[in-house]
Amino acid sequence: MPVIGLIREGKIPADNRVALTPAQCRWLLKSTDFKILVQPSSTRCFSDNEYERSGAVLQEDLSNCDLLLGIKEVPVNMLLANKAYMFFSHTKKLQPYNQKLMQEMVKKKITLIDYECLEHEDGQRIIGFGFFAGIVGAHNGLMAYGERTGAYKLGRVYKQKDYLELIHTYFGLKLPPVKIAVTGSGRVAHGILEIMNIVDVQEVEPDEYINKTFSYPVYVHLKGADLYTHKEKRTYTRDDFHANAPQYECLFQPYTLHTDILMNGVYWDATIPRLFEADDIKADGFKIQTIADITDDAHGSIPVNLGDCTINDPVYGVDKVTLQRTAPYLKTSIDVMAVGNLPNELPRDASRFFGEQLIKHVLSDYIKGSSIIDKATILKEGKLTPGFEYLSDYANS
Ligand SMILES: NC(=O)c1ccc[n+]([C@@H]2O[C@H](COP(=O)([O-])OP(=O)(O)OC[C@H]3O[C@@H](n4cnc5c(N)ncnc54)[C@H](O)[C@@H]3O)[C@@H](O)[C@H]2O)c1
């Protein structure tokens, strides 16, 4: 009988999300032969009592578990030797701040399966929190625009118990005839689109968005081919773009002249062109007043993302002349919402969604064994697996 342990999140500040909800534990206990142990926690979004009522066993000692599930990096002093873990380790890009964690896992002969590395055959990620980042980020973007213009008022997501309660807060909301640009095609973008539809913003085509005036709120959804084109061939194919991003240019510039709110959900790395350049916001025609940068790479696809803010204080201004950070909602600035842990505003729903994917795509594979699990296994009993040997100096020096 395989024993799963849900660990207490140890990273500070403690994350309130969890890999399996009490209802999912109840289902697993009824429908499979898993046994589930749960380390007590006062910061998790579900209480210890809820887990106890699900039939899981609350227990500090997880040394009998076959597989330990967490969310964020496990502090080195909490790592149990010779165990198998799944969590977001943020080590595959040789992140310096997690080198000690990697080295300690090697020493403790740990097996590490990283959620971020779980991919379908075509390279699409299997599991993640992006959908609820999109939901919360889109809400926060609309909220910031309401604050700036005084046209309507939205409350804070984290004050609602769950997503259903959030949806109820939209009752009676009538947005002005804004134009909203939504970028990206992954989970984050899907979360943004969900909010667009719930608050009754109508989708329009790119050419209409640019050329027409509407008497109601509209959004345009800009995906790869709408955003990027090969500098010479003037074409876009996804695989070629992923392989040769520096050969592409960005087509977003015209949208900066017609957009009130930008909701950004693109994948970005330093080889990919930005949506616009920082100096563009100085131009008279630059219309964007609010940017919800859900992708949230500082100085990344949104060059005026000047760094992260927090769930408590999610918006800052960027002065249109000096490009320096200011208070939000000033006439002389545009507003940027840039928060790196948006799903934590809706932790119960984000955890439920994550757990569903985990049960559907990962847990049974873990027991049976599969190439998906193998490819996401960074360490096997403390040794780097073939796909991750490039981490050798990082893991062993
Ligand atoms: N602010 C937050 O709290 C938060 C939370 C989750 C995700 N994010 C960020 O949002 C962004 C989008 O996340 P997501 O969950 O939608 O991702 P996803 O994995 O669901 O989708 C990513 C999209 O990017 C494309 N892509 C993947 N690799 C690429 C490459 N090398 N070059 C170009 N395109 C590529 C994929 O085809 C896919 O359409 C990421 O940068 C992620 O880190 C932020």
Image (tube, rainbow, N blue to C red):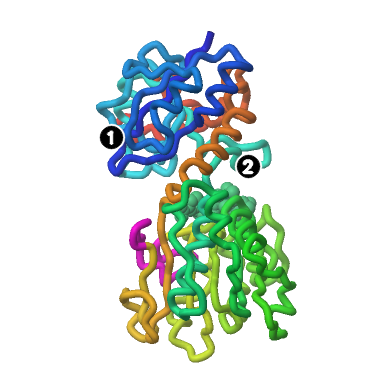
Q: Is residue 233 visible?
A: no
Q: Which residue is mark 1?
A: 100
Viewer-nearest residue: 70 or 277: 70
In this rendering, position of residue 214 left or right of residue 350: right
Q: Judge whether residue 272 is colored magenta.
A: no
- x%, y% of residue 216? 67, 78
Q: Secondary structure at mark 2?
A: loop
Question: Residue at 38% across / 86% down in the picture?
Answer: 332
Q: Is residue 262 visible?
A: yes
Viewer-nearest residue: 95 or 397: 95
In this rendering, position of residue 272 left or right of residue 50: right
Q: Quadrant of residue 315?
A: bottom left
- x%, y% of residue 50? 45, 28
Q: Amino acid at mark 2?
A: Gly
Quadrant including the C terminus: top left
> Mark 2 Cα within 10 Å, few/some/many (few <14, many 20+)?
few
In this rendering, position of residue 191 left or right of residue 58: right
- x%, y% of residue 99? 31, 37
Res. 123 mark: 2
Q: Which residues are magenta?
A: 298-313
Distance from Cα at disc 2 to Cα at disc 1:
28 Å
Q: Judge whether residue 306 is colored magenta.
A: yes
Q: Is residue 112 above or below residue 281?
A: above
Question: Residue at 73% across / 72% down in the picture?
Answer: 204
Question: Residue at 51% across / 47% down in the picture?
Answer: 162
Q: Quadrant of residue 362?
A: top right
- x%, y% of residue 174? 60, 73
Q: Amino acid at mark 1?
A: Lys
Viewer-nearest residue: 90 or 327: 327
Q: Is mark 2 within 8 Å of ligand 1?
A: yes
- Whichever of callouts 2 and 1 sits on the residue coming sooner in the sequence is 1
